[in-house]
């Protein structure tokens, strides 16, 4: 069996893991089902903890150069009143927003040429005491000493090993878009999320005069009428929200919007199974309420590589990876789930009480939470 690592999934988790392994001099190959590099048209925020995890590979510096910096995240009422401000701890890196396609290109360019093979849909996985074998839909086979499952919330690898349904629909659906920020009155340089009784709306400035927005509305799962919603269909929901929210929606063309229901998975009871190890959304998909989905995948990649470097025995390396990642992943998953329920309240009375509490909570309490969230845990 070849002494190399097979990664299934060429998203952020899989590419970061491949970068980390190559940094250690380990042979690695990434197999991605998409026929070519394609990334949904949306933005992403890379928090200080993810930058810390990427520091040894030179990627953090590239994100800082390519991204748009912010020191704080502002939570507002639908009228634009400040509810609270989450500030990056002093002495820490800032948060950086970047378009997903730009981040994806940056990660791909950090890998050796030919590391990623496209159009490889995983069909069957076999493993024994010596290694793993992956059979793809095109009839090809990949072999390695271990397999890293980085194939997302709908992980085909995980479905082959686990039969229990661990998906949880969060109760709300999401639209995202990226548009030009030129000629948009009322646009702030801050990262902003607005909480109202009709839904939430996020605004994140991006580099190159672009802005990323997202909208979350309570809905049954797979609501048919929302599947083809345009930004103009969303306008009646958010037309009474503060500027520039209505202006952003008016500016968004149908081809600039993507939609999906929000769900997570209950974090796996164990992040490995013999010679297969799970990272990112395949192990612990998180609702997007604390901006940590990709950041935790990046932490996974760094810690897994560190464990494989430290322990010659694969089983011991996986055990240590699981120990070092489980508590934090579960904690952030639970926090994000709870925060989503609080933020999506449609009750005027409950919302008023929630907003009052947020305005009057001592800054030290919220900052302690942020400090723990934004610190990379080795």
Image: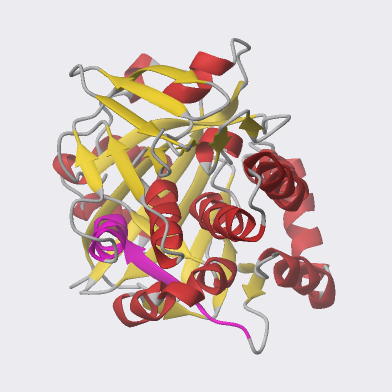
Using the image, determine if residue 112 lies above or below residue 269.
Answer: below
Using the image, determine if residue 112 lies above or below residue 344.
Answer: below
Q: Is residue 155 magenta?
A: no
Seen as rendered, the residue at the extreme top is: 163
Residue 208 at x, y = what percent? 21, 74
Q: Give the color scheme: rainbow, by chain, secondary structure or one colour.
A: secondary structure
Q: Quadrant of the C terminus?
A: bottom right
Number of labels in the image equals 0
For this view, does 245 lie left or right of residue 266?
Answer: left
| Residue occupying image coordinates x 29% and y 56% | 104
Q: Is residue 103 magenta?
A: yes
Relative to the observer, which residue lies in front, 336 or 133? Answer: 133
Q: Is residue 78 visible?
A: no
Seen as rendered, the residue at the extreme bottom is: 91
Using the image, determine if residue 74 lies above or below residue 284.
Answer: below
Q: Which stretch is magenta?
A: 92-109
For this view, does 105 lie left or right of residue 272?
Answer: left
Relative to the observer, which residue lies in front, 289 or 202? Answer: 289
Residue 87 at x, y = what percent? 63, 77
Residue 29 is drawn in which quadrant?
A: top left
Q: Quadrant of the N terminus?
A: top left
| Residue occupying image coordinates x 83% and y 68% | 361
| Residue occupying image coordinates x 31% and y 51% | 42
Relative to the observer, which residue lies in front, 188 or 256? Answer: 256
For this view, does 74 lie left or right of residue 321?
Answer: left
Q: Is residue 153 visible?
A: yes
Residue 123 at x, y = what percent? 34, 16
Residue 298 at x, y = what percent? 51, 57
């Amino acid at each position: 069996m070849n002494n190399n690592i097979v990664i299934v999934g060429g998203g952020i988790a899989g590419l970061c893991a491949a970068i980390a392994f190559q940094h250690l001099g380990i042979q690695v190959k990434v197999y991605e089902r998409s026929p070519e590099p394609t990334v949904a048209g949306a933005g992403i925020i890379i928090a200080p903890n993810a930058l810390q995890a990427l520091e040894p590979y030179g990627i953090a510096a590239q994100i800082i150069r390519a991204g748009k910096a912010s020191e704080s995240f502002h939570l507002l009422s639908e009228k634009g009143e400040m509810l609270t401000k989450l500030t990056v701890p002093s002495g820490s890196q800032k948060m950086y927003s970047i378009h997903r396609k730009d981040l994806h290109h940056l990660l791909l360019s950090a890998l050796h040429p030919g590391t990623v093979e496209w159009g490889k849909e995983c069909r069957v996985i076999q493993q024994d005491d010596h290694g793993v074998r992956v059979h793809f839909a095109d009839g090809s086979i990949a072999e390695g000493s271990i397999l890293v499952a980085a194939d997302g919330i709908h992980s085909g690898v995980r479905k082959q090993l686990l039969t229990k349904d661990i998906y949880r629909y969060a109760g709300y659906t999401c639209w995202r878009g990226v548009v030009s920020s030129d000629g948009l009155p009322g646009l702030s340089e801050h990262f902003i999320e607005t909480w109202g009784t009709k839904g939430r709306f996020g605004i994140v400035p991006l580099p190159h005069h672009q802005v990323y927005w997202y909208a979350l509305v309570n809905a049954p799962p797979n609501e048919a009428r929302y599947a083809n919603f345009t930004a103009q269909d969303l306008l009646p929901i958010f037309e009474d929200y503060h500027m520039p929210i209505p202006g952003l929606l008016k500016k968004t063309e149908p081809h600039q919007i993507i939609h999906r229901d929000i769900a997570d998975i209950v974090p796996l009871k164990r992040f490995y199974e013999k010679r297969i190890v799970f990272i990112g959304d395949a192990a612990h998909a998180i609702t997007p309420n604390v901006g940590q989905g990709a950041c935790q995948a990046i932490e996974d990649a760094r810690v897994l590589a560190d464990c494989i470097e430290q322990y010659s025995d694969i089983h011991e390396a996986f055990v240590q990876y699981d120990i070092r990642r489980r508590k934090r992943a579960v904690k952030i998953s639970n926090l994000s789930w709870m925060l989503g329920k609080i933020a999506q309240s449609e009750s005027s009375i409950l919302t008023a009480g929630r907003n009052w509490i947020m305005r009057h909570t001592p800054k030290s309490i919220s900052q302690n939470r942020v400090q723990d969230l934004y610190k990379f845990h080795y």
